[in-house]
Amino acid sequence: MTDNDAAAVQLSIEDGVAVITVNNPPVNAISQAVRQGLVDAMKIVTTDAAIKAAVIRGAGKVFIAGADVREFGKPPMEPFLPEVVTTIEATDKPVAAAIHGVALGGGFEIALGCHCRVMSPNARVGFPEVNLGIIPGAGGTQRLPRLCGVEKAADLVTSGRQVGAKEAMEAGLIDVIAESEDDLLSAAKRLALSKVKSPLRRISEMSVPAPAAADFFTTEKAKITRAARGQHSPVRALEAVEAAATLPFAEGMKRERAIFQELRASDQAKALRHVFFGERAVSKVPGLENARPRKLDKLAVIGGGTMGAGIAVACLRAGFPVVMIEADAAALDRGKGNVDKNLEGFVSRGRLTADAKDEHLGRLALSLDYGALKDADLVIEAVFEDMEVKKTVFGKLDAAMKPGAVLATNTSYLDINAIAAATTRPGDVIGLHFFSPAFVMRLLEIVRPARTSDDVVATGFELAKKLGKVGVLSGVCDGFIGNRILAKTRKQADYMIEDGALPWDVDKAMEAFGMPMGPFRVMDLAGLDIAWAQRKRTVATRDPKERYVEIADRICEQGWFGQKTGRGWYVYEAGKPVPNPEVEKIILAESARKGIARRTIPAQEIQDRILYAMINEGARIVDEGIAARPLDVDMVKVFGYGFPRWRGGPLCTVDIIGLPKVLDGIRAFARDDPLFWKPSALLERLVAEGKTFADLNT
Ligand code: 3HC
Ligand code: NAI
């Protein structure tokens, strides 16, 4: 314990108050050095007669972001956090927590070990542990209910939700809101000193108020289990809160620790840590370390349809001025209407005020004239998915945009090298592939054609960051990372319904796997007509050896395009999907026409076929260098396609279930369908070398 600037915990004495500063950049994660430093500081507080009270605060931008997640995979080192918190609480001089930025997880637990808490007005507190597949492990689930009741405590620990100063104050989690961040330390000192002569409030000594409803834990458990879709941590967090309500503090602490340790070692926690670090690693592309983004102040979109309007809204929400160009006056009007409708959705959900909506619309300029683009730093083209139309638009952009501007296309499948070749500046052309709705979905595929310069790629990542999205770099190929994998899994889904399953069997199995919606429900949501048009366009180039399932064509021929026509694979009655009985007849007729003897396909086989298809294609994508690392494939599936976070993405899942098992499974499927199930060379290589996909992430 020293007051030197490099120490993880520093102590200075000001006006009789020990100011204990946790200093472990960038987010004051609670490493072993921090834990030891806090214990040592508490010893000084107890023994130094000049100290009347203490304040714990964080250096830099946050109080404490929680346990050091990087230590989780390693053997635990003393002192352990529960003991550190107990030591703080047991101190016989008042200790106040001065919270700025965030106090999360173990950071909030340290604050709850203090005798009182002050928050700066814009700070947040919370227990995000469930998102890492664990629960609070240093008394959070035991102290919180004592402070705010079991209902609120259950809400906070099972959701991982963070609360601001106002809500924290109303819930009794803190004692004071400081006037400003600048005033935080003096407010904390005043608060701590005001407690010197009164008995100290130790939360562990308080009792837990009984829940208002006697069956609270039973009903809550059912609700949380449903919402968690296979993820264990939220239900286990509730179990720990229930322990607080039914056991003495010391026993509850033991229960919490046991659950924490069990979960910390679990596959789900491993997968969720992979997502936590993967989300941050995707923007650190090997080889691009020195690339600096170009200026990004003014944006433009071409096209005001589903995607153009959605992208415009995402950009407006991030504070950018946006120019929208359309083909004619009527389309421009529709484009404005689409933006308006999307923003209105935010207003009706209480996430935007009417005034803020007007302010957003005030930053949207509409034009039919490409001259309006002359100041734009980056333009995103989202016109019809047609190469000739795109080439014409890029020719016009080339003429209108200033030198150094970035020219991006939102194409889903087209060859961006060919689009770039329609300009005199292919080095400035890039793919920015958004997902619908663009103002909701977190994924942004940043697609790099052959001649794009590094700083243009860096600008793509900068835009992703500014829009709050997860940017993942992809090379050019048919469908890029995400839709290329999707095409394979869709094919498997098609084969299975022709072989014996029904769409709702496939959906049920994949929803049980943890997907928010099965593939057929997703198709109904997106519209069956788009894929139908694509199939008709590519009929001439289809590989005649490849199995082609016509069931979806038969459905579309009826005019059933999914939710938008009220009927697709399902019938939508009052918005709820009910299996379409006519679909079953069509499927049986198609199987019979092809002479296929239908068989029952068990849920496990459905899951394996879809998962193994994802893994195999994902591995090929890595092997070809389309994705820089396996983690990039994982983040695409997690942030763009609803792959369960707690499974970490397909290439994390295969590491967990074992590469040899999956390769054997693929080879077994290949006996019936060798064309589809050709094992990826990378997968074979990794199995031969006894390696995992994680080995390629570092
Ligand atoms: N442990 C280790 N590293 C962490 C960390 C943690 N708890 N939290 C953040 N980091 C790292 C990030 O990986 C990143 O590293 P990098 O620069 O090498 O990529 C760096 O700190 C900065 O993080 P962000 O990029 O996320 O910075 P932001 O400013 O956007 O966000 C934050 C800051 C809000 C604190 C955010 O990082 C966050 O939410 N962190 C996670 C908090 C959390 O989950 N805490 C609970 C931990 S589990 C626990 O406490 C168990 C306990 O109950 C026993
Ligand atoms: P859309 O049909 O809803 O909108 C296209 C818009 O482009 C129309 O409003 C049209 O008037 C306008 N347009 C056509 N030619 C134009 C021109 N020369 N100049 C200016 N505007 C012109 O189509 P959507 O769905 O928005 O798709 C646009 C692009 O985004 C396509 O390339 C598509 O592949 C891609 N995409 C679509 C996704 C989706 O879920 N719909 C997801 C990701 C990408």
Image (cartoon, rainbow, N blue to C red):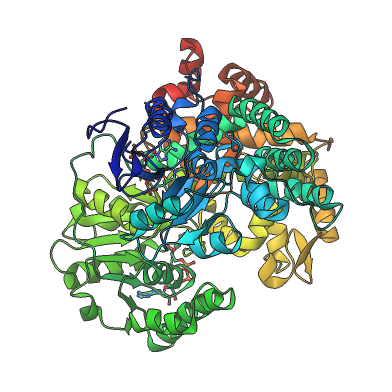
Q: Residue at x 51, y 53 (%)?
A: 538
Answer yes or no: is residue 338 visible: yes
Residue 491: x and y in percent read 62, 43
Query: Ligand 2 appears in which quadrant?
Result: bottom left
**In the rendered view, would you say 533 is above or below 669?**
below
Question: Who is closer to the viewer here, 595 or 111?
Answer: 111
Q: Does 389 sit left or right of 673 as displayed?
A: left
72 to the left or right of 320: right
Residue farthest top in this picture: 689
x, y percentage for residue 141? 64, 41
Res 384 quadrant in image: bottom left
Q: Residue at x 50, y 37 (%)?
A: 92
Position of the N terminus, as image quadrant, is top left
Q: Where is residue 670 in the image (x, y as percent from the top left)?
A: 64, 24
Asked whether the viewer can see residue 475, the reply is no
Above or below: residue 329 compared with residue 536? below
Residue at 32%, 53% (x, y): give it.
416
Splitting the image into 4 quarters, where does residue 385 fall? bottom left
Residue furthest left as drawn: 403
Q: How many marks?
A: 0
The answer to which of 259 and 431 lies nearer the viewer is 259
Q: Does residue 425 appear to the left or right of 475 in the view shown?
A: left
Horizontal arrangement in the rendering, residue 551 relative to residue 80 (left or right): right
Q: Name the one closer to the observer, 374 or 182.
A: 182
Please provide percent x and percent y for residue 209. Answer: 75, 51
The residue closer to the viewer here, 28 or 318, is 28
Picture quarter with the C terminus: top left
